[in-house]
Image: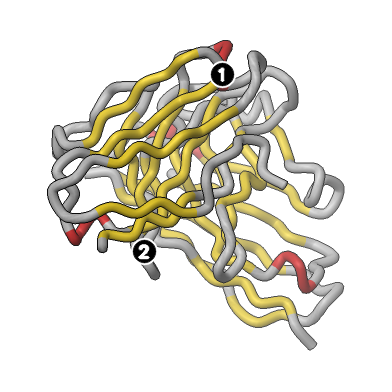
């Protein structure tokens, strides 16, 4: 059974940093690209970032480019999102999601339960 | 503003059928078979209901079906049940920008 478990969310002040983690199990992690998708409270889904199986291809939404960094550690079956210079508009549930393919930003097939990031003073 | 356009809301009575549309461009929905649909209940993570336009993952009811015509994909739910009340999102592979795209979501109300 595919499982994706996010951690690292919490309350943070504007301008500060936070690092999210996603622990993956139930599939061969290094065979697949991975995504981060966020959802502000009461709003729709927004793709944040994606990374190919070998970290060779990385993409970001314009809203986070230059502030967020995605990475993965295939030896640890883990995905990360380093979020710097956080803004109140970054407040959202952040979901780790698995791609059905090794590269390319194809719609995810499995999602974690999400971790809430609140940016507020 | 979302890259894919969905109606904000749809409704139907138990037993009826409803269809939710997802309109994009030839650079996403119209150009590829990689269109997915997700169901999201309040406080829960999205769940994949349809992938590659019309395929159902194992365990998803056959009351859910997907199709595509031109730049518009559609999700049809037949035999509506109370448990189908949720938000539904479409997503597509896109070549126009280096990112995935989602629709703005559709709230389904079962009357």
The answer to whether residue B45 is seen in the rendering is yes
Distance between the alpha carbons at the discs numbered 1 and 2: 29 Å
In the visual, does A50 lie left or right of B82? Answer: right
Q: Any mark on residue B44, and which?
A: 2
Residue at mark 1: B71
In the visual, does B67 lie left or right of A11? Answer: left
A120 over B87 or under it: above or below: below
Check the residue under mark 1 and report the chain it is in: B
A63 over B92 or under it: above or below: below
* Quadrant where the image shows the C terminus of chain B: bottom left
Mark 2 surroundings: few (<14), some (14-19) or many (≥20) residues within 10 A: few
- Residue shown at the point (46%, 25%) measured from the top left: B73
Looking at the rendered structure, the secondary structure element under dot 1 is: loop
Q: Position of residue B94 (x, y in %)?
A: 63, 22
In the visual, does B45 lie left or right of A2? Answer: right
- Residue shown at the point (51%, 23%) measured from the top left: B72
In the visual, does A67 lie left or right of B28? Answer: right
Q: Position of residue B37 (x, y in %)?
A: 40, 37
In this rendered view, identify the residue nearer to me: B29 or B6: B6
Q: Position of residue A29 (x, y in %)?
A: 41, 35
Looking at the rendered structure, the secondary structure element under dot 2 is: loop
- Residue shown at the point (57%, 55%) measured from the top left: A44
Q: Position of residue B92 (x, y in %)?
A: 53, 28
Residue furthest to the bottom: A121
A15 over B6 or under it: above or below: below
In this rendered view, identify the residue nearer to me: A18 or A90: A90
């Amino acid at each position: 059974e595919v499982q994706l478990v996010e951690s690292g969310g919490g309350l943070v002040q504007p301008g500060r940093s936070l690092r999210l983690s996603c622990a993956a199990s139930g599939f061969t992690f290094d065979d697949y690209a991975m995504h981060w998708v966020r959802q502000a409270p009461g709003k729709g889904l927004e793709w944040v970032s994606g990374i190919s199986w070998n970290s060779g291809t990385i993409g970001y939404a314009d809203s986070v480019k230059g502030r967020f960094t995605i990475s993965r550690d295939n030896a640890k079956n883990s995905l990360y999102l380093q979020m710097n210079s956080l803004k109140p508009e970054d407040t959202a549930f952040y979901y780790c999601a698995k791609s059905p393919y090794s590269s390319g930003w194809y719609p995810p097939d499995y999602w974690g339960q999400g971790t809430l990031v609140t940016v507020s003073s | 503003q979302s890259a894919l356009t969905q109606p904000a809301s749809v409704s139907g009575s138990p037993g009826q059928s409803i269809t939710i549309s997802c309109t994009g461009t030839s650079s996403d929905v119209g150009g590829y078979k990689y269109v997915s649909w997700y169901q999201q209940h309040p406080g829960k993570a999205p769940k994949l209901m349809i992938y590659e336009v019309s395929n159902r993952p194992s365990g998803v009811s056959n009351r859910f079906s997907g199709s595509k015509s031109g730049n518009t994909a559609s999700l049809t739910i037949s035999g509506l049940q109370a448990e189908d009340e949720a938000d539904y999102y479409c997503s597509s592979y896109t070549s126009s920008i280096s990112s995935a795209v989602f629709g703005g979501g559709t709230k389904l109300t079962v009357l």
